[in-house]
Amino acid sequence: MPRSRAPMGRRILLSTALVGAATLVPVGPAPAANPTPDTRQQQYAAAAAEYGVPESVLVAVSYLESRWDTNAGTPSTSAGYGPMHLTDATYVDSLGEPSHFGPEEDPRGDDSRTPIQAAEPAPNPPAEAALQTLDAAATVTGSGEDALRSDPAANIRGGAALLASYQKEIGAPVGAGTDPAAWYGAVARYSGSDSTDSAATFADEVYATIRTGAARTTDDGQRVTLAARKVTPQKSWLDKLGLRTVARADGVECPAELACEWIRAPYQLLGDGTDPEYYGNHDLSDRPARQKIEYIVIHDTEETYVRTLELVQDPAYVSWHYTMRSSDGHTAQHVKTKDVAWQAGNWYVNSKSIGIEHEGFARKGTWYTETMYRTSAKLVGHLAKKFDIPLDRQHIIGHDNVPGTIPSTVRGMHWDPGPYWDWSHYFDLLGAPFRSTGTPATGLVTMDPEFASNRPAFWGCQLDENDMPTSEPCPLRGSSSVILHSAPSQDAPLVKDAGLHEDGSPSTMEVSDHGARASAGQSYAVADRQGDWTAIWYLGQKAWFYNPTSAPVAKWATGFVVTPKPGRATIPVYGRAYPEEAAYPAGVPYQTLRPLQYTLSAGERYAVGLVAPSEFYKAYTFAGTFPGDWTVIRGKMRYVQIQFGHRIMFVNKDDVDILPSAVGAPS
């Protein structure tokens, strides 16, 4: 989303909708602690026994929070630490980004339209009922807060103590031998939700995990297993929590199992209300009858959930369709899917996409909670099925994959959800895992690094007093990004991106500079191979990445590629698939077909995403005041969407040959 910079002194606050710190109920004096167990599995078992929590409940709750990862003792986007996601809402500074939208820019992403002045964000809201569980865990266990943040064993003990306290608080039975089904109320309370629907959604997912089981190796190399077992939770315990009941709004477009509410983004005239071209903050339409929805765009908010809701309700700001809360996955819908939100910075993509904001901080390097990943995957799966959107990285894209519209907008495009979003895990949850579909001879690769062990050395996760990234290294953490070099060597400079570095210098490892990165799930045409190195075609150059057979970071794939037609030395590359001039009716301004600053030359090959019709949704005025508004202009031109760099781009279908990827592939 458009970033708004918070004051340096501001602290991360969780939603004011969340409950306050737990009213602790003593769970009895803890027995003398045994020496710290050696393995993570033993740490869960020991904490469960110490505080009388069924081990399956403790392990499943932890999985829904962190997938048992430690994240090197760093916080989540909702200020949660460790495997149990103990939250400390007053500890972490919020370092969002400055807004890209100024008075000279159009937040709709349509450079031909009269710009709308983006509103200055309102002052940050006061702290209200921020959820604190880390200090509560410190009170119950006697452990120091630093240990609860950084020591996995202490963190797990803290989570177990809180679950036991919540269980006693509602008068439910406590003991490691108690039926896990009787812990539904305590599990729901652990979510931090203040409403029955959100708390129940979290608890239902925990119990689904108990039924299916889980096993994985954590980010610090610990193998943890949750054996599957039959359990039917006793949901009546939820009534003991005294949470508010939220009536589901009619027409909210979410799957039934998610907790969703309707918080409207305003559609209204601005100023004195007399100028029909001066309005906000989205456009009405009738999709998919008027235009097919091709994309779902994944964003992060760079703001807290509370602040994000304030922004989307500002008529002079921009809009998006959904916002998701980090702590429990609670979802708010703001714009109907039939309408066009101003969310991607590219009007062509806006008019053909749905935008989902996830509470998070890409630059800060905080981690995304498992419950939000799962909620998001359920929503995206639901929308993809409803609108017939393929579950692949050509259609489910990040904001960082949306191209600039014309050369001058390329550098200012956003880069969320950033390199720390786990695309591979996300597509596993969508039921569309990245699989090998080819061989070394089929000419394509699909990026898929092992997320936990792939830890690029980024820098710039902190900003100085002038909102400039510092040279301080970012925390080493898992990433979906594969780093691309100009030659098959780790010492070779990174490849260049003419749109981000106009002086011709190489890309950098600054966290927002994605000019030399490919991301999990993206497919590229193979350009060369040399030993353990593979080269792909990327922004008009060969880009090399380390891809040893013993630990590959990409899967061989098959599909289609484009290459310039014979006799064409170069062809233009576009950031939008607009019609030719002859397609525009009289009186409608022509959207000039302006190529981007990149070059696609003879001999280069790029992976095909889809073949797109040329379209321009004409929506200039409030309520369709001008004749011909709310119509789609379609031309004879057709475009091919390609994976040209980190972002998708478009070429004129008449300029290229579309070939099976194996044809002409390097041996």
Image (cartoon, grey):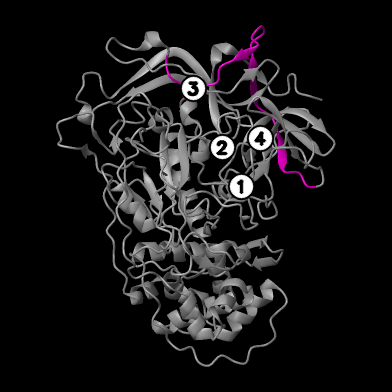
The answer to which image quadrant residue 366 occupies is bottom right
Q: Within 10 angstroms of label 1, few (less than 14), some, or many (20 or more) residues?
A: many
Q: Residue at x 63, y 76 (%)?
A: 153
Q: Mark 3 and mark 2: span between their CA atoms?
A: 16 Å
Residue 276 falls left or right of residue 648:
left
Circle 4 — which element?
loop
Which dot marks residue 506? 4
In 3D space, how far apart are the residues under numbered discs 3 and 1 (Cα atoms)? 26 Å
Q: Which residue is mark 1?
A: 424
Is 204 colored magenta in this rendering? Answer: no
* Kind of residue sitting beneath label 2: Arg
Q: Secondary structure at mark 3?
A: strand
Point out residue 49 in the picture as x, y percentages from the top left corner. 60, 83
Q: Is residue 570 magenta?
A: yes
- 443 versus 253 height, above or below: above
The amino acid type of the residue labelled 3 equals: Ala
How far apart marks 2 and 1 lie (CA) works out to 10 Å
Question: How many other residues sit within 10 Å of disc 2, few (<14), some (14-19) or many (≥20)?
Answer: many
Q: Quadrant of residue 599?
A: top right
Q: Which residues are magenta?
A: 551-579
Residue reaching furthest front? 466
| Contact, mark 4 vs mark 3 (Cβ under 8 Å) | no
Task: Indicate the quadrant containing the C terminus: top left, top right, bottom left or bottom right.
Answer: top right
Question: Of label 1 and label 4, which has the lower sequence position?
Answer: 1
Between disc 2 and disc 1, whose residue precedes? 2
- Label 1's element? helix
- Residue 612, which numbered label? 3
The Cα atoms of the two marked residues, 4 and 2, are separated by 26 Å
In the image, residue 429 sits, relative to residue 171, either above or below, namely above
> For the residue carrying disc 3, how many other residues have a C-alpha within 10 Å: few (<14), some (14-19), or many (20+)?
some
Q: How busy is the neighbourhood of tag 4: few (under 14 within 10 Å), some, or many (20 plus)?
A: some
Residue that label 2 marks: 393
